[in-house]
Amino acid sequence: MKIDTVVHKIDNSNIDEKILAQAAALLKQGELVAFPTETVYGLGADALRPEASKKIYTAKGRPSDNPLIIHVAEFEALYHIAKEVPESAKRLAAKFWPGPLTMILPKSEAVPYETTGGMDTVAIRMPDHPLALALIKAGGGYVAAPSANTSGRPSPTLAEHVYQDLSGKVAMILDGGAVGIGLESTIVDLSEEIPMILRPGYITKEMLEEVIGEVQVDPGLIAADSDVKPKAPGMKYRHYAPKANLVIVKGEPEAVVDRINAMTKEHLAAGKKVGVIGTDETIVLYEATVIKSIGSRQDEDSIARHLYAILREYDEMDVDCIFSESFATPRIGHAIMNRLLKAAGHQVIEV
Ligand code: TXA
Ligand code: MG
């Protein structure tokens, strides 16, 4: 069933109270409202109402075993939706909330299985965005929100991306402009004895370890085609695959440029259209059909911020293949490469 999707531009520093009240009313009626967070846009529904959560799965075309993150605006909310709140959760929240960190805890009875994809644990995050926080507060305090994309497409970093994927499927989109980080939150599972990262993000393993001691990384994340399944159900799906064949070239900068140019030449000679993903520092060195800079190596956050938009832009162009540099930058590189490798189906050439 198609519904009318209303889009409202919002000034994040002066939020229109009337529109906010309308958005909150929609959430309370069990409808879907998309909104910006500091990581990516989220597709919100009342997390404590099973029918509302179900609508999210339908709108996204999301497998029903893939659980949702509940977004809260106050730390105290944890006591309602988690069975217990360990010391580690308190310390991490004190340090990183509001912010790009999702914690997994055993769920309470208040949380329906429709929201957790049948799991006995619940993922919880307090986003660092004024509009997101205002909407959560006004909308009842517990907003389930996956990234606001169609399942399998890159996460949305602009309201336009949400509209491309979900117009006719959501009641309202709150357009708060471009997001800040551009990659989804770090997910840390606190439900087992040793905390484990299930999805890398802006908050790194080292940052977590400074606060709570030893943290492990889900072995299912590192393996490319192994039998070890990732612990977060969503990480097992092949996400963000662009229409063109994407290959990553890894190595010393000069050798990477040479190899990409050599492969481009071959493909152009064979009548193919070739796209390149380079950086501000290298784009002048390439010769291809389309060349895009993802950001600057001097500013790794800029690379994270533009990754999904670049993949979407290439989806709209009819290139046959894309060659990308590798972006294993010092801090957020682990998160960037986790997404880029998935988009490339783990096709990497080392030079
Ligand atoms: O930055 C973000 O986290 C964004 C914004 C909107 O907040 N949200 C987001 O949600 O990325 P989503 O649904 O696209 O990704 C949630 C991931 C999925 O991989 C899901 O499988 C995992 O979190 N997840 C959720 N609950 C879980 C649980 N109880 N146990 C293990 N993994 C869980
Ligand atoms: Mg997602």
Image (cartoon, grey):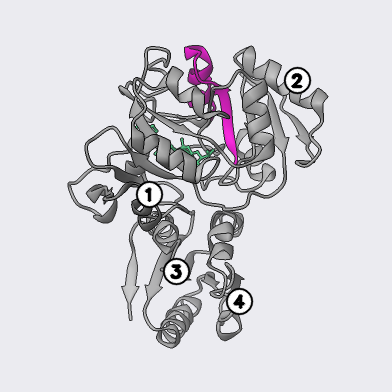
Image position of 259 (left or right of 9): left
Task: Estimate the spatial distance between the alpha carbons at disc 4 and disc 2, rounded to whole Å.
Answer: 42 Å
Snapshot quadrant of residue 343:
bottom left
Q: Whole-percent x and y of residue 303?
A: 55, 64
Nearer the observer, 288 or 340: 340
Amino acid marked by disc 2: Gln
**CB-based contact (under 8 Å), mark 3 and mark 4:** no
Task: Estimate the spatial distance between the alpha carbons at disc 4 and disc 1, rounded to whole Å.
Answer: 35 Å
Amino acid marked by disc 3: Phe
Q: Which mark is residue 22?
A: 2
Amino acid marked by disc 1: Val
**Residue occupying the point 37% across, 54% down:** 210
Picture quarter with the C terminus = bottom left
The residue tagged 4 is 280
The residue tagged 1 is 211
Magenta-drawn segment: 41-59
Decide: few, some or many residues near mark 1? Use Cα within 10 Å; few <14, some 14-19, many ≥20: some
Vertical side of 292 occupied by 177: above or below: above
Snapshot quadrant of residue 98:
top right
**Residue occupying the point 46% across, 70% down:** 323
